[in-house]
């Protein structure tokens, strides 16, 4: 039988899905073991048990000076920035995308501008943002917004344009104004796309967030990673990396679930 | 006094003439079938009736009004596909025919309740009450087209435009849709324009059959001359002398 027609059975699917995770963990454990054998003081590849201990300490024990658990404080600060930036981007891209997709005048005015804007490398603008908006929260949120809005806007405008012309004409024959067409025909049909855009953009959003926090901040997940780098505290860095990955995964999963629950008509044909 | 009056209409895209000298007078309540070869401008003619396109020259008036600049509630339309809103349930699609004409596209309170009742009555009539809460994607092609026709009728247009409404349906469903449309027509006496590829369908349903073709043909420049109405058949009483043999060769 051809390889493309060979489908794994259910238990095998679970096993295969777990395989890469297990493989990476074992490879790390072996590597760590070899290094620690040669030099028990080695800091580069801490043993998994060390990481687990560090993680437990980071999640539960408050800082001696500030009496606060730094990891939760960092998480809160970073998530606020991330969700703020992504939320603003989503709202902006939705409004501009609808305008470009529906109104020929705004399409003429903005579509090439957005296309050029999306080519500007956002990280290159970071120094400007720090100069203009200062080192506080604003510059970090603005970096995320600048980084992901143009891409999301272009995609949403494209989706609006892909709504069959028949539907737009039909709505007009039912007496719908431009506003009603935007609100009741176009908007509900691009909302699922907006959510999948947000899911795609979250990776870049984390990148911009951590970059901004690494350069100038006093709290945040990215800040902490770059701070402890000075002490080669790999156990802390790895804990933070795993934590960020977990957060990103949960946010992605929540959005996916929301999309499925909120837009039942998407799957009606399946 | 004619109801829809098309006088001296021309249409061209760039240098390509599509239609020229189209003149026709339609009485209220007539069912007009429009037939012709592919690319002869029959869909263009329908789009102009719909006011999705404006004629290059000439006027199209409904009940003595001016040539419309954009589609409005005077005209109902059913396309071959994409005529209903995929994100609204079957019932909400019918309510939309009333609510879209408001400021924010929504009805509330007593108005919405009344609209829902009318929607349910229409669902009964088009035989879709058992799928009222489903989404269009879950419906068969024939059911979607019935919904599209019901939705267009709910808005109470003055003329109904059908652009190959049964083109994507299988022959059996198509026959059912013919009966459905004829029934609906007897009840409402609506003025209908239907573009079709199927001559038999055109003669079966229509009171008149308009044939679009190019009367002049320049072999050096095919885009030089446009099409016009070359025949205007009286298709009442089964289209005598073009007798229809029902069930003769439906699949052909």
Image (tube, grey):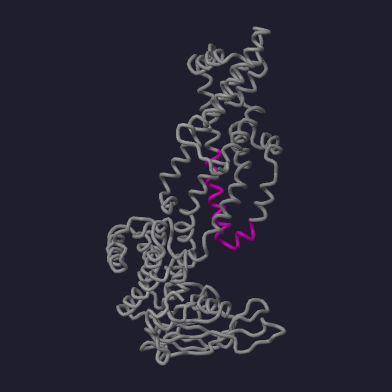
Indicate the position of residue B92 as horizontal and vertical percent values.
36, 59
Q: Relative to A233, is B224 above or below?
A: below
Q: Relative to A99, is B16 above or below?
A: below
Q: Quadrant of the N terminus of chain B?
A: bottom left
Q: Is residue A191 left or right of residue A228?
A: left
Number of on-image labels: 0
Q: In front here: A144 or B148?
A: B148
Indicate the position of residue B60 as horizontal and vertical percent values.
50, 83
Chief secondary structure of the magenta span? helix
Indicate the position of residue B115 as horizontal and vertical percent values.
31, 63
Indicate the position of residue A76 as horizontal and vertical percent values.
51, 27
Q: In front here: A248 or A65?
A: A248
Chain part drawn in magenta? A85-110
A90 drawn magenta:
yes
Rendering quarter of residue A44: top right
Q: Relative to A222, is B75 above or below?
A: below
B152 drawn magenta:
no
Residue found at x 33% / y 55%: B133
Q: In front here: A8 or A35?
A: A8
Q: Is residue B127 left or right of residue B235?
A: left
Q: Is residue B128 left or right of residue B87?
A: left
Rendering quarter of residue B102: bottom left
Residue found at x 43% / y 49%: A263
Residue placed furthest toward the front: A1
């Amino acid at each position: 039988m051809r390889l493309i027609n060979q489908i794994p059975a259910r238990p095998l699917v679970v096993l295969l899905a777990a395989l890469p995770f297990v493989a990476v963990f074992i490879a790390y454990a072996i590597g760590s073991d070899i290094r620690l054998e040669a030099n028990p003081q080695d800091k580069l590849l801490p043993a998994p048990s060390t990481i687990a201990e560090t993680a437990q300490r980071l999640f539960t024990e408050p800082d001696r000076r500030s009496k606060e658990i730094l990891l939760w404080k960092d998480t809160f600060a970073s998530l606020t920035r991330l969700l703020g930036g992504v939320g603003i981007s989503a709202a902006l891209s939705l409004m501009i995308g609808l305008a470009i997709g529906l109104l020929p005048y705004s399409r003429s005015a903005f579509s090439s501008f957005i296309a050029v804007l999306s080519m500007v490398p956002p990280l290159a603008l970071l120094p400007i943002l720090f100069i203009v908006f200062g080192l506080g929260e604003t510059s970090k949120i603005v970096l995320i917004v600048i980084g992901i809005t143009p891409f999301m806007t272009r995609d949403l405008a494209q989706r609006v344009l892909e709504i069959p012309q028949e539907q737009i004409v039909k709505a007009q024959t039912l007496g719908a104004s431009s506003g009603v067409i935007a609100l009741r025909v176009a908007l509900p049909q691009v909302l699922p796309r907006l959510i999948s855009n947000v899911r795609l953009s979250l990776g870049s959003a984390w990148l911009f967030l951590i970059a901004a926090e690494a350069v100038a901040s006093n709290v945040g997940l990215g800040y902490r990673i770059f701070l402890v780098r000075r002490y080669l505290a790999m156990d802390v860095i790895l804990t933070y990396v795993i934590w960020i990955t977990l957060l990103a995964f949960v946010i992605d999963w929540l959005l996916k679930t929301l999309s499925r629950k909120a837009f039942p008509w998407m799957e009606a044909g399946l | 006094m004619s109801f829809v009056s098309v006088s001296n209409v021309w249409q061209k895209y760039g240098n390509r003439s599509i239609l020229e000298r189209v003149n026709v007078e339609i009485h209220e309540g007539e069912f007009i079938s429009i037939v012709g070869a592919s690319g002869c401008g029959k869909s263009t003619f329908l789009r102009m009736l719909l006011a999705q396109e404006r004629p290059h020259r000439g006027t199209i008036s409904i009940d003595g009004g001016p040539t419309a600049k954009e589609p409005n509630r005077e005209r109902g339309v059913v396309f071959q596909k994409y005529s209903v809103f995929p994100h609204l349930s079957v019932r909400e699609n019918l309510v939309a025919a009333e609510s879209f004409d408001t400021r924010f596209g929504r009805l509330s309170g007593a108005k919405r309740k009344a609209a829902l009742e009318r929607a349910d009555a229409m669902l009964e009539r088009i035989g879709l009450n058992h799928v009222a809460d489903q989404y269009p994607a879950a419906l068969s092609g024939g059911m979607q087209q019935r919904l599209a026709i019901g939705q267009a009728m709910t808005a109470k247009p003055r003329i109904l435009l059908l652009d190959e409404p049964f083109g994507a349906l299988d022959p059996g469903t198509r026959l059912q849709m013919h009966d459905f449309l004829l029934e609906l027509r007897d009840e409402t006496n609506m003025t209908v324009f239907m573009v079709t590829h199927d001559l038999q369908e055109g003669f079966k349903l229509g009171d008149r059959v308009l044939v679009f073709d190019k009367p002049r043909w320049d072999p050096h420049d095919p885009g030089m001359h446009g099409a016009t109405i070359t025949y205007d058949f009286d298709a009442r009483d089964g289209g005598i002398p073009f007798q229809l043999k029902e069930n003769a060769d439906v699949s052909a």
